[in-house]
Amino acid sequence: MIRLNKMTDYAVVMLSHMAGDSASVTTAVQMAEDSGVPLPSVSKLMKQLSKAGILGSHRGAGGGYSLDRSPGDISVAEIVTALEGPIALTACIDGADTSCGSMPQCAMSGNWNQVNQAIQAALDSVSLADMMPRPFAFVPPSEKLKSDIRNELQHSDNVGETHIESAS
Amino acid sequence: MIRLNKMTDYAVVMLSHMAGDSASVTTAVQMAEDSGVPLPSVSKLMKQLSKAGILGSHRGAGGGYSLDRSPGDISVAEIVTALEGPIALTACIDGADTSCGSMPQCAMSGNWNQVNQAIQAALDSVSLADMMPRPFAFVPPSEKLKSDIRNELQHSDNVGETHIESAS
DNA sequence: TTAAACAGTACCAATTTAGTCCTGTTTGAG
DNA sequence: CTCAAACAGGACTAAATTGGTACTGTTTAA
């Protein structure tokens, strides 16, 4: 399982919340309360998001963070990149010399790049708006959603295993 | 940066090596020497790969592991899945109740699924053969492969650049 | 002036990952 | 038949990463 940081997940939840809420500015404290994410993490995340230009920040009393851009204009790729750096699957890119010297074949890892670009495209094609729970639809049942997801996941699980299970 | 386990990277290197080498069976020890990957890790990896049906195993003296399938028939997705489980970006699937109860908005995370599927498609469309350092140089797969991926993503963005190495 | 709020940095704890070790089990070869 | 080569499987340890904490600025509206 290729894991995204929990932080990134938090961020999407938070941004989604801000996009759905009409309040123009939200303080970190408010957000922590709303989302259940621990305040320090919220704080850290919002700082990063603001630094990346995804959120606007307003200091001083009565300040907070604001989502000035349109949710449809913010791609998941941008969020991920803001929090986790460039999107890539291995460490063997960008001339990272870490421990690669010991493995001559490592040059081959460059081919991961194809995959990386495809993933970039994937994250690029989904916007924050897409991640939001339909603004109009009143769908509370998380149960249905989950089974839905599981369903879709299994549907695409056809990796064509040969399964040579050694009879022991 | 979305990180793939180092193990998976190792695995691709190893499999690639086996695909390129004509030897029918390779022992873990041999592989460790060839690849520079620590023996225990090689051993663990090959066990997993054999269990997943990607490698064949032959016990006893003179035994070892063999790559019986064609490299073009083994997708990166299959390798990743064998080593890291189902391809997905968050933990918020499969009814994982972990800490999700505290966050009502978490149901929304289901939308990650779009992204997950795109990533699955990306990994699906690249085979072990594509990851090999051209054994027989007359295979320039990049173009076909990319349009393939783009196709599956059904969102032809500007990713189609013939831009393989992103080193700066 | 003051307090609310962001900005930045250093730090700790918990989880995860990579790697080690050891004890079977199978099996070809002598 | 015996032996050693090689896989199978599990428990364990060490290191790296991540998530969370704490604290000390800086800005600014009231």
Image (cartoon, coloured by chain):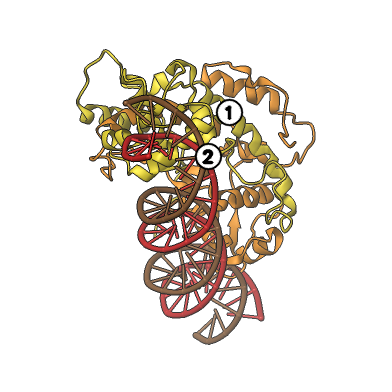
Chain colours: A yellow, B orange, C red, D brown
Q: Position of residue C8 (x, y in %)?
A: 54, 44
The location of residue D22, given as percent across then percent down, is 38, 56
Subunit of mark 1? A
Q: Is residue A109 above or below residue A16?
A: below
Circle 1: residue type = Ala
As drawn, the residue found furthest toward the top would be: A136
Q: Amino acid at mark 2?
A: Glu
Rendered view: B44 above or below D14: above
Q: Is residue A104 above or below residue C8?
A: below
Residue drawn at point x = 73 percent, y = 46 percent: A107
Toward which corner of the image does residue C14 lie, by quadrant? bottom left
Q: Is residue B7 visible?
A: yes
Residue B41 found in image quarter: bottom right
Could you say which is closer to the camera, residue C30 or residue B98?
B98
Q: Using the rendered image of the protein, determine whether residue B121 is visible from the camera's viewpoint.
A: no
The tag on residue A118 is 1
Q: Residue at x 65, y 35 (%)?
A: A113
Chain at numbered mark 2: A
Image quadrant containing the N terminus of chain A: top left
Cα separation between marks 1 and 2: 17 Å
Tell me the mark number nearer the camera, choosing from 1 and 2.
Answer: 2
Look at 59% across and 64% down and name the residue there.
Answer: B63
Residue picked out by circle 2 = A84
Residue B22 appears at what percent x and percent y? 72, 51
Q: Residues within 10 Å of mark 2 (few under 14, many from 20)?
A: some
Report whether B164 appears left or right of D11: right
Q: Nearer the viewer, residue D24 or B103?
A: D24
Counting residues from the N terminus, which is met first, the one under dot 1 or under dot 2?
2
**Most foreground residue, A32 or A84:** A32
Q: Give the label on residue A39, or none.
A: none
Secondary structure of the residue carrying numbered label 1 = helix
User: Which sits in the foreground, D19 or C28?
Assistant: D19
